[in-house]
Image (tube, rainbow, N blue to C red):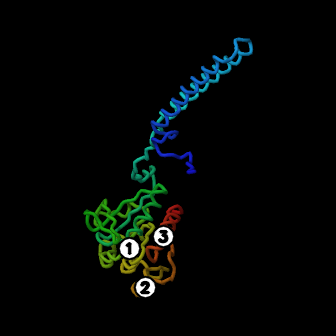
Amino acid sequence: GQKFTRCQTPGDPGGPGERGKISWKVEVVIYFLEEFRYQRKIPNTWEGTMKRVVLILLTVSLIMGCQAVEKEEKKVTPKEEKPAAVEEEAPKPAPGAKKILMIIAHKDFRDEEYKQPRDIFEGEGFEVTVASSSLEEAKGMLGMEVKPDILLDQVNVEDYDAIIFVGGSGASEYWDNSTAHTITQKAVQTNKILAAICIAPVTLANACVLSGKKATVYQSRIGEIQAKGAKYEETDVIRDGNIITASGPQASRAFARAIVEALKES
């Protein structure tokens, strides 16, 4: 014949539904009546009395057990509520923390060359300030939006321990920018950490601070830094004194770690 598993749909007799609950109640009543009828046939002797006591105890035990099952079935397990996603806030810098200035293009900075280093810097407890040519939201090549803290012409190099030029196609806006050149030159003169990634090292080269220095850059711009006296090295990240350069977005984290190391030495 057809067989059924114990996993029945709600509402089937013996299952978790109402009909299942009615089923066992009826069975208990029938069992009790049968036992009562059977007890009447037991002779009125000491042995018969003991049989009656045992039957009564079994019946009571069965009823109490069924009631416990019913109570258990009525229990509702509360649904687990997933905590709402909360955007993580950057850790607040400690008093006396190193201060880093990140300079980004107003349009088409490279997202990961900004975001990945910034996360690492803030994870170290450093204080990060963002400068750009406009205070309106800067747009990254991959869609990131960043609200700059200050304008490029408001930068006071003395306020920072490191100056970083972020790359991306938009970084070319600083190649021939006199304010950007002045910032790089003052950074070198005051022994600050000066760093640039992707095509941004061209800004340093045009400011004449890479002459005689080992440096790297995005492949398409090798000739431009060499023309200004830089000693090009085919590597992701290179440090020459207080100047650190990197070749592109794939080097973003290594670039940041090199800057952290340099800051901890200073």
Which residue is outermost to the right?
Answer: 47
Residue type beneath disc 3: Phe
Q: Quick one: SS at disc 1?
A: loop
* Nearer to the camera, 243 or 64: 64
x and y percentages locating residue 120 in the rendered image: 47, 61
From the image, tell me which residue sits under label 1: 167
Number of marks:
3
x and y percentages locating residue 217 in the rendered image: 44, 80
Q: Residues within 10 Å of mark 1 (few under 14, many from 20)?
A: many
Q: Left or right: 7 with respect to 201?
A: right
Q: Vertical placement of 108 versus 81: above or below?
A: below
From the image, tell me which residue sits under label 2: 222
Q: Disc 1 and disc 3: Cα gap in Å?
A: 12 Å
Residue under the point 35% across and 70% down: 142
Q: Disc 2 and disc 1: Cα gap in Å?
A: 15 Å
Residue type beneath disc 2: Ile
For residue 255, the mark is: 3
* Nearer to the camera, 196 or 91: 91
Which residue is outermost to the front?
Answer: 41
Q: Quick one: SS at disc 2?
A: helix
Comes first in the chain, label 1 or label 3:
1
Comes first in the chain, label 2 or label 1:
1
